Structure formats: C-alpha cells, structure tokens
Image: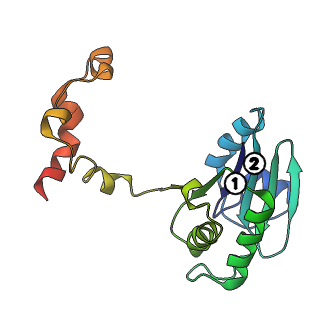
Amino acid sequence: MRVLLLCNGIMEEVKEKLGLKHGKPESWINGICWRMKKTSGLEVMYLFPQNSELTFTDGNITFRSYSQKRIDRVEQKQYDEFTGILRSFKPDVVHIFGTEHSHTLAMVRACEELGCLGRVVIHIQGLVQFYSYHYSLNVPIRTLCTKTFRDVLRGGGDKKRTEGFSAARNF
C-alpha cells in the first residue's frame, strides 16, 4: 500500500537530518512515522512545507518538501507540484493533516482532477468538540440510549455515554 501524508509542519527528525533550524515541530507525527517504518508492505511519502526542494528516504518513507509561499491562498505552482507528485507516486491513500492552510485545498483539487478524491482522508485537529454537538443529529434516541458491548465491559451507563450528545438535540 502506498500512503501519501500531507502535513503543514516538519518533524523534528526531518529538521535534524536536513540541518533546518526553523519550522514548528510536529512531534505527534513522529510516532505515526515510527510505526509506519516497522510496517511491511507499506510505502509512505511524507510531504512537508519548505521553500527549497528537499528529498530523502529513510527505510520505507520518502520525505519530500513542497513549496508554500503563502498559506492563505492556493497558488498554481503548489497545485501543479501536488498534481505531479500524485501522478508519480500513485498513492492508494492521501492522508491530509489539518485544514487550516491552503495546501489542503490545493491537494484536494489535485486529487479531484486526477480522479482519486475517494482516496482522500482529512484529519481534523482542534475542532472535535464542536462536531460532537452534531454527531448524533439524525440518530434515533433509542439507539443512542442503548447499552453497547463496551458499556457492559467497562461498566459505563447509558446516561454517561450520551450526555455529551444531548446538546445536539437542542439545535
């Protein structure tokens, strides 16, 4: 399986290897990449923002920079770059971390043009609580209040499990 990871930051490991001193650290993704290195049959391309072209391979992971001059609008150069990467790497899955910058839209548009939009996964960060209010919007109350196998094993109750979702019923 070929997985393309599009990130908006640079892992500490990559910064050290390339001798970079700037860029916010993405330490949470170090664990993901470490596990991916140990997975056989997996080929990964990790894309990170850097205005100079940088590429290196460590095991089954290729680390590659992408250009990002502006984060507030999609630039044709970035879109073309992503289209080229998608054509050459041919990923089975495109996993995009974060939606707050223009690189997400550029990658989604490139995937749409190449017919691989159905392979895109977008990992949201920081907005989860807001979504929890809408999570159960069209789920019947009876279903929400039924004990699950997990509830039985952990001793949880109907009320505790569903209390966070009750706000959705008030909209």
Q: How many labels does the image show?
A: 2
Q: Which residue is drawn at 83% across and 74% down?
A: 52
Looking at the rendered image, the quarter that the N terminus falls into is top right
Label 1 residue SS:
strand
7 or 88, nearer to the observer:
88
Q: CB of mark 1 within 8 Å of CB of mark 2?
A: yes
Q: How crowded is mark 2: few (under 14 residues within 10 Å), some or many (20 or more)?
A: many
Q: In the rendered view, does 57 fall on the left or right side of 108? A: right
Callout 2: SS: strand
The tag on residue 4 is 1
The percent position of residue 85, horizontal first and vertical second, equals 77, 65
77 shown above or below 17 = below
Compared to residue 166, the image places residue 120 above or below, namely below
Q: Residue 149 carries which label?
A: none
Residue at (16%, 45%) from the top-left corner?
A: 166
Query: Where residue 123 sits in the image (x, y, percent)?
Result: 52, 54
Task: Please report the residue visible at 80 percent of the width from the left and 56 percent of the height from the top.
Answer: 63
Measured in 3D between alpha carbons, the distance from the residue under mark 1 to the one under mark 2, in whole angstroms, is 6 Å
As drawn, is 160 to the left or to the right of 68? left
Task: Compare residues 108 and 161 and report the one nearer the observer.
Answer: 108
Q: Note whether residue 120 is visible.
A: no
User: Percent position (x, y) of residue 146?
Assistant: 18, 27
For the question of whether residue 91 can be seen, the reply is yes
| Residue 44 marker | 2
- The kind of residue on which mark 1 rests is Leu
Quarter containing the C terminus: bottom left
